[in-house]
Image: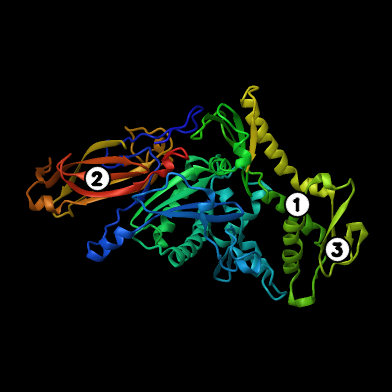
Amino acid sequence: MAQRSNPPRRVRRKFAHTDSSTSTSTSRVSDEDDIQLRDSARYRQNLLTAKKLLLCLDYGTTLTSISYITFDPDDPPTDVHPRGVRCIANWPAASRFVNAASPFVPSESWYRDGNFLWGHEVQHTLRNLSDNDDVESMNCIIQLPKLLLDDDGESVDNDQLSQPRNALRKVGRTAREAIRDYLMKVFKHTHGQLAKYEGFNNTWEVELVLCVPSKWSTYAHLTMQEILLEVVEKTDMRGREFSIFIIDEPEAAVTFALRHENIRENIEKGSNFIVCDAGGGTVDAITYKVRQDPPFRVDEIATPAGKDCGSSYINQAFIEESRERLAHIIELGWGPVYSKEAVLQEHLFLNFEHELKRIYDPADWEEGESRSLRVFGLREDPTRNFGNSMFFITKEQMENYYRRSLEGTVDLIMEQLEQLNGQEVKDRVVAQGESAEICMHRAFEVGQEMAAYETIYFSDQRVFQHYRIDHSKNRGHRKAGVVEASLDVLRRRNMLEEKINEDGDVYYEVHYSIKLEVNGRNVKATIHCPPGQEVQGETQICIAAAFSPGTN
């Protein structure tokens, strides 16, 4: 497995167990059953031609994309050029706003009138609202749920996250449920595109790469892993073999960026460089030293950091101020065909994104200068800086919109520089196994169903083995999976011990062992009865979230 150099950020958890009838694991895991393959000549023939799908999910705060490559699992590529990476496209309703070939789909959804809208469908519906539509339902649009996945709930007064919190409360959903519902649609579309253009089917091997913010906690990694395991199961994306690989977003960014010749030519062995991954919701900064070139190998030399100061907060600041400036106006546009909200979405918010925000350079603006966005139906009002169908924005206002994002990004980079203690920074880039065996025993009443089962738990805290799993000292644990075995075969073979308790009641006692074998990013849990001998039951559990992002 790939290892990271100092400073360590997270450590791999070790397995532990209790003396009770359930076993406790301090590794981050999630329940996942083995897949039983059908033994038929046709199926075996399909396996001979099956491919491997390497799928990468970049679930962003504002935009989501899925990229992939396919190859022969018996002859994997040693190097992949960025031009060899393909992307899922043709997102529903995309052609109304962007080129259908665009790989990006908005990371937003809308629970509206019993329907679930997602991606481009949300903006398409907003821009076609009439005065007869229920504008209040806009409060049920789910945006930025990713930022709430690792939210401790302490900053409940943070205005930046009040909208998604209120929207989730109105529709009776948690951030986890909203993300799951959204990704269910994303992966359903992905399955259709892969089946149509690549011939994807359930005989393929699938490895899913998940990019995560560097500041995410173990809890967030585990929650996202559990969401994806449910999503790929329900959208038939598991294939015949499935695994998850988790990588930090800035690490993924630098891996891609270093394939660019203009960046590589400035970085050599021994040089330091800072990567700033500025996304829609979060901005991550991380510093590397080049250990080897070629092949290119880097080590982290500063503790990575991240903040919620991405570009979506620029839009949010503009939208909030614009709504205040226009609050006294009841109608805009061309009468009752389109509502005021539809005009704002279509002509103000969208044009701000494309005509001002993406090309904004303060050096191009004179002090006191204003730029305009066309808003039909807006009457001239110099006191509010409105022209005839013109909405003016000053340089000072633009600076205020950008302030949170720019100051947060600068702070992150300065923190990285301070950790280097004066070391030179060459460049800044923005953009096999182990096993454990646990011996257990269980008592059965006469006539009781003969089954052995053990529940495996995850805990990110210290495990107190001499306390029960539900004791307050072991709070925070989460169920990872269950391994179960029927013992009827042992009863038929007279391998169960008949016992008599102090009251003279007869019961059976069976001794067995649990074996946990780590293989890559999965754990295989098996029940052996007698202990250490015959396998009576097994299950496979994904533990990708248990490792530091980037561990292979």
- Measure how far apart labels 3 and 1 are at the Cα level: 19 Å
**Front position among marks 3 and 1:** 1
Quadrant (top left, top right, bottom left, bottom right) of the C terminus: top left
- Measure how far apart labels 2 and 1 are at the Cα level: 58 Å
Q: Is residue 425 left or right of residue 489?
A: right
Tag 2 or tag 3, which sits nearer the N-term? 3
Q: Residue at x 65, y 25 (%)?
A: 424
Q: Amino acid at mark 1?
A: Ile
Q: Is residue 441 above or below residue 370?
A: above
Number of callouts: 3
Q: Position of residue 369 (x, y in %)?
A: 89, 50
The local crowd at label 2, few if under 14, some if 14 to 19, many if 20 or more residues have their Cα within 10 Å, is many
Q: Amino acid at mark 3?
A: Met
Q: Residue at x 62, y 25 (%)?
A: 420
Secondary element type, mark 3: strand
Q: Pointer 3: what residue?
A: 390
Q: Pointer 1: what residue?
A: 359
Residue at the far right in the pictured view: 382
Q: Are marks 3 and 2 in contact (CB under 8 Å)?
A: no
Q: Are marks 2 and 1 in contact (CB under 8 Å)?
A: no
Q: Position of residue 506 (x, y in %)?
A: 10, 47
The local crowd at label 3, few if under 14, some if 14 to 19, many if 20 or more residues have their Cα within 10 Å, is some
Q: Amino acid at mark 2?
A: Thr
Secondary element type, mark 2: strand
Q: Pointer 2: what residue?
A: 526
* Residue 179 visible at all: yes
Q: Position of residue 81 (x, y in %)?
A: 51, 48
Q: Quadrant of residue 230?
A: bottom left
Secondary element type, mark 1: helix
**Front position among marks 2 and 1:** 1
- Measure how far apart labels 3 and 2 are at the Cα level: 69 Å
